Image: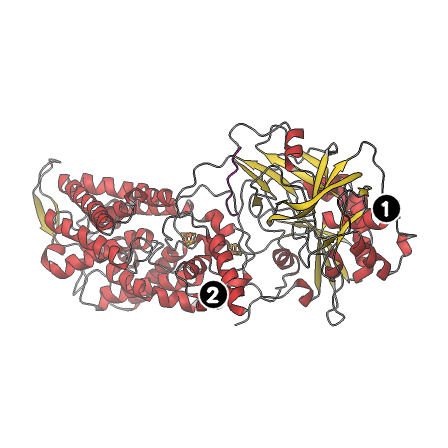
């Protein structure tokens, strides 16, 4: 086993409070609010209307485009409203509100794939699409699209991402410890679809239990690589750099150099879809930070975050921020009514103090040193600040992965990522 | 309950601008204390004058321009302290005050304040004084009386100055004297051990980057060795290192982030250029000391160095 890394990056306190907390089922909520848009890509339309009775796992929204992913009811009950609700990523969005009935019934249409070990590649891919599987690490890109590289781009390497480099989060770690067999079966399904020469399962060294439990389950043509505990080790491009020393071309995708990266949570979801016919209607969420009892929970999608918080003993006194995802890249929420969606890996409660003001950049280059993409964050922030738009591309703005390392280290507290996001918006608008 | 919304990341390292500036000042303390002890109360007056002058100048500028007074960040105080350290200890105080004013006004505020200046403000202040009062700026001294509060001084040449045009200083100032700061010189430059310790702490704490001091050190040692071992009457490398402003310059001025390159490669270039310039100015230039000009010249080149050493983004092509 080798220990590998990438240039740049930071070492925030790991704060994995829930590393040894087994995954528990969150009691079903009275009502779920399921956003129709839970993936990156074309929007979905509802397939149910107000008053409809739905089962657990009933399709409630889908789109016609290839790059889209259907959504399903996560409880058995009645559609009470289709309207505009809080959305964890977009602020507001169309969602289906369902009131739960006492007895849970699985949708009768749910059937596992017959003889999954010997199923055709096309059947597997179609199952992954039809069951609404998306990247569970937070990216929420539809998995069937990622697993359908154009024939001109053969895939030689599959990387399974179990790095979980964000501080606090432990949902992937726990899944690897508790459901190793299922994950490995999921990996085999992906192998069957892509037929890569090599498969690596990458795990950060701070998860020895996950490493040893998966180690015992490895099958032919799978290798565990232990990567250094460093943020953002789990970034696709960083992981590829660390393991294969290959560079994804600027502006390109891993598949341009023959690589596909899949998160361990996605592998687990693929297993459930294929072996049990289960649509993606629940996921593991780490509830952590300043809650009274941090836990790892299996949560039905559409459950308002307030239910999770309550189950974990409530927020501690003085909490003023609730984040979906990890502290480095997560999104701060405006309401505790916001529902959990496919890409929600964690719920993090924080006590944020007064924010120190933004001081002038002293060109100390700390941001330059930690930037895993080797661009010049300080320069980009300045370019946006002074609206020198023509320089944005010359300074490789679009290569920024918004990992936040630069802001994390900046002594002058400059919200560089905020500037960069504004710059990206501007650039996109200019290109139109 | 009111939830606050901020953009990611939601956690920060504990390093702040203030911490950077005050840590530098703390690391300067050993050399400062020695300077005050050795040169007596005049050195203390000099330090106080420079500090007040830089701080007050910055306050005035911010008030006039109606910008928030940022004096708490410690950068103006640091400029004042550094300026005092590179001045002769017995300089008339009004000149020191003028130097402080120039350092902040011309050195920093005309460029737009902290972070936008091209030249190291303290060195710019000193360069101004050097041009305006060349005699006073090259008049050095050691305290005349044992009494700490005595204001008298005996003027002497600095070790580097005695060595020109024909070098004879190697024997005159043995290594121990230079290490412990028992020789005439600028107030904060004489106590070599204090500067080395302070500088190493600064680097160990990652407040300063090691590349520029190391590159300057290696270049200086290699170049001066070549002259020392091949020619006659050239000062030894250790003399180059210890007798003038090299330590303070390399460890505390050339590590000023604002005025030095932000690329790693660029920092090596800066350090090498600085080391080479020091040797050439000292040996062949008209001045006995070359640290100030070397750093100021490299400051001027910094934007160019930055441009030429821009890193390639991950997966990027030239
Ligand atoms: S870390 Fe902050 S202060 Fe330092 S160069 Fe980058 S933006 Fe400027
Ligand atoms: S510039 Fe972008 S990629 Fe680089 S450290 Fe900042 S957020 Fe990360």
Could you say which is closer to the camera, residue A367 or residue A94? A94
Residue furthest out toward the right: A115
Pointer 1 or 2: first along the chain: 1
From the viewer's perspective, is B75 left or right of A61?
Answer: left
**Dot 1 falls on which chain?**
A
Residue A415, image x, y percentages: 46, 50
A187 on left or right of A141: right
What is the quadrant of residue B303 in the picture? bottom left
Please tell me whether residue B267 belongs to the stretch shown in magenta: no
Query: Magenta-highlighted stretch: main secondary structure?
Result: loop
Q: Is residue B218 visible?
A: yes
Determine whether, in the image, residue A258 is placed left or right of residue B197: right
Instruction: Let me know if marks 1 and 2 both belong to one chain.
Output: yes
Q: Quick one: SS at disc 1?
A: helix
Residue A208 drawn at (x, y percent): 69, 41
Output the chain of dot 2. A
**Labels 1 & 2 near each other (Cβ < 8 A):** no
- The residues colored magenta run B1-8
Local crowd at mark 1 within 10 Å, few (<14), some, or many (≥20)?
some
Identify the residue position indicated by label 1 in the image.
A276
Judging by the rendered image, the residue that carries numbered circle 2 is A392
CA separation, marks 1 and 2? 49 Å
């Amino acid at each position: 086993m080798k220990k590998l890394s990438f240039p740049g990056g930071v070492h925030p306190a790991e704060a994995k409070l829930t590393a040894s907390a087994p995954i528990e089922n969150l009691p079903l909520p009275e009502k779920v609010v399921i956003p129709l848009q839970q993936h990156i890509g074309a929007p979905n339309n509802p397939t149910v209307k107000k008053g409809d009775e739905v089962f657990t796992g009933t399709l409630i929204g889908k789109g016609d485009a290839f790059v889209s992913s259907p959504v399903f009811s996560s409880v058995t009950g009645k559609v009470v409203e289709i309207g505009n609700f809080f959305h964890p990523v977009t602020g507001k969005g169309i969602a289906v509100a369902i009131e739960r009935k006492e007895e849970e019934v699985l949708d009768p249409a749910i059937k596992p794939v017959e003889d999954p070990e010997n199923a055709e590649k096309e059947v597997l891919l179609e199952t992954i699409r039809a069951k609404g599987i998306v990247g569970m690490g937070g990216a929420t890109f539809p998995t069937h699209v990622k697993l359908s590289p154009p024939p001109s781009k053969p895939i030689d390497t599959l990387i399974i991402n179990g790095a979980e480099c964000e501080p606090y989060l432990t949902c992937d770690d726990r899944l690897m410890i508790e459901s190793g067999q299922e994950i490995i079966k999921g990996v085999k399904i992906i192998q069957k679809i892509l037929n890569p020469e090599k498969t690596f399962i990458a795990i950060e060294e701070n998860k020895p239990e996950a490493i040893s439990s998966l180690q015992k389950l490895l099958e032919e043509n799978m290798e565990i690589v232990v990567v250094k505990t460093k943020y953002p080790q789990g970034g696709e491009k960083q992981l590829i750099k660390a393991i294969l020393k290959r560079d994804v071309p600027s502006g390109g995708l891993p598949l341009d150099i023959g690589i596909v990266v899949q998160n361990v949570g996605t592998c687990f979801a693929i297993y459930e879809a294929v072996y049990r016919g289960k649509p993606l209607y629940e996921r593991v969420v780490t509830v952590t930070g300043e809650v009274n009892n941090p836990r790892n929970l299996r949560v039905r999608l559409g459950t308002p975050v307030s239910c999770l918080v309550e189950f974990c003993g409530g927020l501690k006194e003085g909490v003023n921020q609730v984040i979906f995802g990890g502290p480095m890249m997560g999104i701060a929420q405006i309401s505790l009514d916001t529902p959990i969606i496919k890409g929600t890996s964690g719920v993090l409660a924080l006590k944020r103090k007064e924010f120190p003001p933004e001081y002038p950049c002293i060109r100390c280059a700390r941001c330059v040193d930690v930037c895993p993409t080797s661009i010049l964050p300080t320069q980009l922030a300045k370019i946006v600040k002074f609206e020198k738009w023509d320089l944005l591309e010359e300074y490789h703005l679009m290569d920024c992965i918004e990992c936040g390392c630069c802001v994390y280290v900046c002594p002058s507290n400059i919200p560089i990522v905020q500037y960069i996001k504004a710059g990206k918006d501007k650039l996109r608008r200019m290109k139109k | 309950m009111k939830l606050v919304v901020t953009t990611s990341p939601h956690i920060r390292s504990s390093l702040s601008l203030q911490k950077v500036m005050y840590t530098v000042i703390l690391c300067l303390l050993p050399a400062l204390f020695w300077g005050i002890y050795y040169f007596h109360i005049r050195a203390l007056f000099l330090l106080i004058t420079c500090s007040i002058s830089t701080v007050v100048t910055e306050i005035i500028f911010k008030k006039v321009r109606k910008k928030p007074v940022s004096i708490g960040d410690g950068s103006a105080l640091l400029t004042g302290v550094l300026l005092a350290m590179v001045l002769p200890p017995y300089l008339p105080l009004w000149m020191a005050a003028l130097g402080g004013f120039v350092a902040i006004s011309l050195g920093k505020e005309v460029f737009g304040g902290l972070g936008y200046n091209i030249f190291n403000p303290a060195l710019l202040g000193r360069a101004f004084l050097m041009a305006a009062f060349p005699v006073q700026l090259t008049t050095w001294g050691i305290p005349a009386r044992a009494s700490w509060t005595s204001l008298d001084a005996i003027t002497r040449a600095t070790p580097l100055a005695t060595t020109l045009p024909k070098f004879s200083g190697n024997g005159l100032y043995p290594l121990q004297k230079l290490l412990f700061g028992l020789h005439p010189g600028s107030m904060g430059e004489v106590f070599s051990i204090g500067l080395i310790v302070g500088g190493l702490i600064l680097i160990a704490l990652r407040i300063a980057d090691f590349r520029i001091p190391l590159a300057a050190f290696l270049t200086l040692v290699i170049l001066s060795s070549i002259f020392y071992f091949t020619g006659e009457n050239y000062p030894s490398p250790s003399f180059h290192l210890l007798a003038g402003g090299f330590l303070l310059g390399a460890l505390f001025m050339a590590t000023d982030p604002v005025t030095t390159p932000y690329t790693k490669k660029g920092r090596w270039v800066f350090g090498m250029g600085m080391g080479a310039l020091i040797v050439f100015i000292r040996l062949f230039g008209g001045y006995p000391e070359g640290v100030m000009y070397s750093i100021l010249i490299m400051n001027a080149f910094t934007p160019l160095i930055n441009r030429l050493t821009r890193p390639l983004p991950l997966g990027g092509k030239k």
